[in-house]
Image: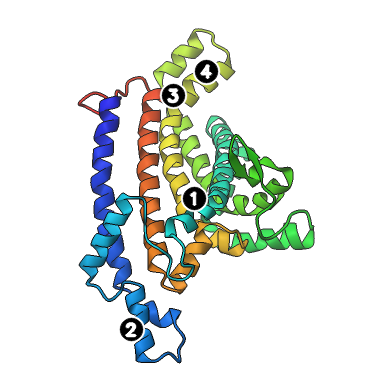
Amino acid sequence: MTAFILRRLMQSVGVVAVMSLIVFFGVHIVGDPVYLLINPQADQEDIEAAIRALGLDRPIWEQYWHFLTGALQGDLGRSFVFGEPALKLILDRMPATLELAIAALLMAIIFGIPLGLYAGLKPQSWVSKTIMAGSILGFSLPTFWVGIMLIMVFAVMLGWLPSTGRGPTATFLGITSSLFTLEGWRYVLLPATNLALLKISLVVRLTRAGTREAIHQDYIRFARAKGLPTHRVIGVHLLKNILIPVVTVLGLEFGNLVAFSVVTETIFAWPGMGRLLISSIQSLDRPVIVAYLIIIVLMFIIINLVVDILYSLLDPRVRLGEKSA
């Protein structure tokens, strides 16, 4: 296990280095932020002074080297717009985005796995057919439309839940989050539901497919032949085996929830990283865009490592420390 983790960490360093190069040059060849940041009436002297102040007068290779040396020290640059460290701006907004992602992931697990199990165990029942039809809708409906409908129904018509913003927060074990308050959950529920709908549909279909395949395997027949109760056959023998692909998908989808929650955060005016990214793109705030993408790359690398470790816990046949891993 230790050898596997060390090997993956060494590979990750190379991946981050390559991605930093691609991201930095990709962002810096698009547009010129100077003309968006200064007064349109500024003369040429003011423009040149702004270019020097932002460090844009240096060759791009020199800018990249300056960024790389700073990144190794934990400095991903300063925002052109806010004048603050880009990393600080992102980390300040990360808890809000993580709240949405965690709540959406919990919904996908709580609703997706039981519904998928039921649909797989009783595929001919009308309930199962309704579940699968609902999963198709979850895949088909666009996120922005679902978000608007949720606001119209639950916030405007019924008045049950707030439509925008983040609720009050509380601190528990040094972590500050709106998930620790009942009022905070009222604010989280609508955007998290909007974000989770596609993931619930995905988990339902994965769980159903795994159940239909595993239910006819010899180890399930043997467990039933031994006289084990149904809940133990399903909850231990069947569920543990079908969870491996589900864990893989959920791990990657959690990264997607964090990285691509832009639409949901925009619709519900949620103060997370997605809204910061949109405003940074509009103003060509390069340091914030680059820092955001680098953090997302690191997050996906960590998630993949955690998923691989969970493999070995779910399936004893997987030995991550062996050469065959």
Mark 3 is on which residue type?
A: His
Packing grade of label 1 (10 A; few <14, some 14-19, many >=20) is many
Q: Quadrant of the C terminus?
A: top left
Q: Contact, CB < 8 Å: mark 3 with mark 1? A: no
> Earlier along the polypeptide chain: callout 3 or callout 2?
2
* Number of marks drawn: 4
* Residue 233 - label: 4
For marks 4 and 1 on the same chain, the one whose residue lies earlier in the sequence? 4
Q: Measuring from the top left, give residue 222's x and y in whole percent.
A: 44, 12
Q: Earlier in the sequence, mark 3 or mark 4?
A: 3
Q: Looking at the image, tell me whether mark 2 or mark 1 is earlier in sequence order.
A: 2
Q: Which mark is residue 288?
A: none
Q: Quadrant of the N terminus?
A: top left
Can you tell which quarter of the image residue 27 is in? bottom left
> Which residue position holds label 3?
216
Q: Find residue 48 and name its label.
A: 2
| Frontmost residue, 178 versus 190 | 178
The residue under label 2 is which amino acid type?
Glu
Which label number is shown at residue 257?
1
Q: Mark 3 or mark 2: which is in front?
A: 2
Measured in 3D between alpha carbons, the distance from the residue under mark 3 to the one under mark 4, in whole angstroms, is: 12 Å
